């Protein structure tokens, strides 16, 4: 926990850039690592030094513990920040970093371990007085035992993977007849995904919201809660839109959630930034779901409503410095929303897209934050997850933040690959979303309808500009490849055409 000077950022893309920026603001040097696929990525240039760590597949680069520790050694780093994803929640990585005499910017390996086993997490939370979803606190060995437990809980129940999280190895069981095959399906899926097939049972909650509490803990025994994030807008367990605060959380409920979250973190000796996930039932009851022992993708919405830089606080805690956050009943100010801009085609079942980003115009202006990881000229591949950037806005009210997000999304221009941009605009235009009338099944229920709706008029102009830019670019590269022998015929540029179209309201 000694002060350090140089930090190796064991990640890529927007989170690598986010951590490098925090390092620089803390007066620390940052060392980037990059795979063969990321030589031209912005995070490589943002760092003081960048170390190549291998081939594009993550297993040969961003997941290779020995290479990362060796890169930290040769560049004389004293610490490693894992970002999110990749090795961020692997206890053996935290352990190896520490064993190498480096500081792991994150919680102790023991806390990662305890929360990674979902039944152990449930036992610990129960012991700490945190409400957990009714269910088993030990793995169920077979479908017969599961049947006995399910009868006790009452159907429907959920089978979940002990080593799981994020919905893999999870099966809904409506009645006893479904149990045996559900058990086998969940077990083999868990085995494939985690190398461990153990399952446990929970009572199934109908239409809950996903609410999570951000916590920070330092080495002086302080644990503070930075309110909730509403994360119910997700598709197949991938979040698309997050906000803070949640329309469903009153100051009184926030206090109770925060107390539960700080108790949860305290009970595992937590350090740094962490998140306690809860399900909030329509009845108002809440239940511990799991703890994420890392920085989260959606951390910026909390930063904007609490005026805290979570990554800088992580770096402070890791150096043995006290949190700069004040205690007491912290309340959010205003409202923040995040849209995840992914390289996925919403009109083709969110198929991950690949190709070169030809042109990128990020939104800006009042209250707008763009946490991106790519720029024009970068190639998007299938080696890594499809997150290109996060667009985050703040407004003094939720309505103002929604309006600002729509404005910012209209400013965004991405040429070359499809993105989630158009889908976000459709969600933002939906009356249920606007009222905050959402739960974890929202996108499953309304996604198709949103996509079938008329193209939002506000999107037509950015799409026309994008198409015009691409045409211009292709014309220019064709001309460069084969210089014309005769001067080209005079014709209006695509810019002129786009401007004409706009002037007639097209
Ligand atoms: C649940 C649930 C209802 N009841 N548990 C999905 C992923 C994993 N983190 C937990 N998940 C759920 N657990 C009980 N007892 C509903 C979900 C769930 C969900 C949770 C959070 C965010 C989105 C979700 C989408 C579908 C189901």
Image (cartoon, helix red, strand yellow):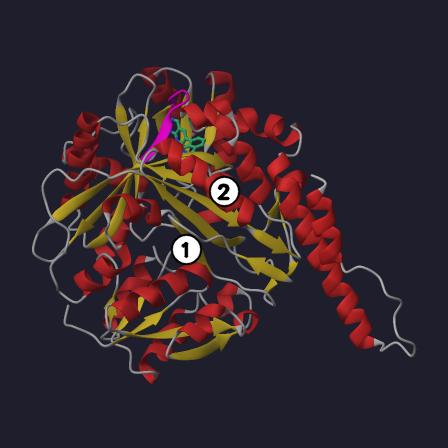
Residues packed near mark 2 inside 10 Å, few (<14), some (14 to 19) or many (20 plus):
some
Q: Which residue appears at 76% of the width and 70% of the height?
A: 477
Q: Which residue appears at 57% of the width and 59% of the height?
A: 360
Residue pictured at 41% horizontal, 72% vertical: 46
Which residue: 34% across, 66% down?
A: 21
Mark 2: which secondary structure?
Answer: helix
Which quadrant is home to the N terminus?
bottom left
**Quick check: can you spot residue 299?**
yes
- Which region is colored magenta? 204-211
Q: Is residue 434 left or right of residue 124?
A: right
Viewer-closest of 476 and 246: 476
Q: Is residue 37 above or below residue 14?
A: below
Residue 438 visible in the shown view:
no
**What whole-number distance in Å separates the C-alpha atoms at marks 1 and 2?**
30 Å
Characterize the local packing of mark 1: few (<14), some (14-19) or many (20 or more) Cα atoms within 10 angstroms. some
> Can you identify the residue that label 2 sits on?
407
Q: Secondary structure at mark 1?
A: loop
Residue ranking furthest to the left: 220
- The answer to whether residue 240 is above or below residue 177 is below
In terms of image quadrants, where is residue 285? top left
Q: Which mark is residue 85?
A: 1
Q: Nearer the viewer, residue 151 or 326?
A: 326
Q: Is residue 213 left or right of residue 169?
A: left
Q: In the rendering, at what x and y percent does residue 274 appear? A: 26, 49
Mark whose residue sits in front, 1 or 2: 2
Q: Quadrant of residue 272?
A: bottom left
Disc 2 under 8 Å from ligand 1? The reply is no
Number of the label disc, if any, that sits on residue 359: none
404 lies above or below 70: above
* Secondary structure character of the magenta stretch overall: loop
């Amino acid at each position: 926990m000694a002060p350090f000077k140089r930090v190796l950022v064991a990640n890529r893309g927007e989170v690598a850039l986010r951590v490098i920026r925090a390092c620089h603001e803390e007066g620390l040097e940052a060392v980037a690592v990059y795979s063969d696929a990321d030589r031209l990525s912005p995070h490589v240039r943002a760092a003081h030094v960048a170390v190549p760590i291998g081939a594009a597949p993550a297993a040969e680069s961003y997941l290779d513990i020995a290479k990362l520790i060796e890169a930290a050694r040769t560049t004389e780093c004293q610490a490693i920040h894992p970002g999110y994803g990749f090795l961020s929640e692997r206890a053996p990585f935290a352990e190896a970093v520490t064993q190498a005499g480096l500081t792991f910017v994150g919680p102790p390996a023991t806390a990662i371990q305890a929360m990674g086993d979902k039944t152990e997490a449930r036992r610990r939370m129960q012991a700490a007085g945190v409400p957990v979803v009714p269910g088993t606190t030990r793995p169920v060995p077979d479908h017969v035992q599961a049947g006995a437990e399910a009868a006790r809980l009452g159907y429907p129940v959920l089978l979940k993977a002990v080593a799981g999280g994020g919905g893999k190895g999870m099966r809904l069981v409506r009645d006893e007849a479904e149990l045996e095959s559900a058990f086998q399906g969940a077990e083999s899926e868990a085995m494939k995904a985690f190398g461990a097939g153990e399952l446990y049972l929970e009572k199934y909650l109908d239409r809950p919201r996903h609410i999570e509490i951000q916590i920070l803990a330092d080495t002086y025994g302080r644990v503070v809660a930075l309110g909730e994030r509403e994360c119910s807008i997700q598709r197949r367990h991938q979040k698309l839109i997050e906000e803070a605060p949640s329309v469903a959380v009153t100051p009184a409920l926030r206090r109770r959630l925060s107390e539960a979250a700080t108790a949860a973190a305290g009970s595992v000796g937590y350090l740094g930034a962490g998140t306690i996930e809860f399900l909030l039932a329509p009845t108002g009851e809440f239940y511990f779901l799991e703890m994420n022992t890392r920085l989260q993708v959606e951390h910026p919405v909390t930063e904007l409503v609490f005026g805290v830089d979570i990554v800088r606080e992580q770096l402070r805690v890791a150096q043995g410095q006290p949190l700069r956050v004040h205690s007491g009943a912290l309340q959010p100010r205003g409202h923040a929303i995040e849209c995840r801009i992914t390289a996925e085609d919403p009109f083709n079942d969110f198929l991950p897209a690949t190709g070169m980003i030809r042109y990128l115009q990020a939104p800006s202006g009042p209250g707008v934050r763009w946490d991106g990881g790519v720029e024009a000229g970068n190639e998007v591949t299938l080696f890594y997850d499809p997150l290109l950037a996060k667009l985050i806005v703040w407004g003094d009210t939720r309505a103002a933040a929604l309006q600002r997000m729509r404005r910012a999304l209209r400013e965004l221009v991405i040429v070359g690959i499809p993105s989630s941009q158009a889908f976000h605009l459709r969600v933002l235009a939906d009356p249920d979303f606007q009222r905050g009338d959402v739960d974890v099944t929202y996108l499953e229920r309304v996604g198709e309808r949103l996509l079938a709706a008329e193209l939002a008029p506000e999107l037509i102009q950015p799409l026309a500009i994008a198409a015009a830019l691409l045409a211009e670019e292709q014309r220019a590269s064709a001309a460069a490849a084969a210089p014309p022998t005769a001067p080209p015929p005079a014709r209006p540029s695509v810019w002129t055409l786009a401007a004409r179209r706009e002037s007639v309201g097209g």
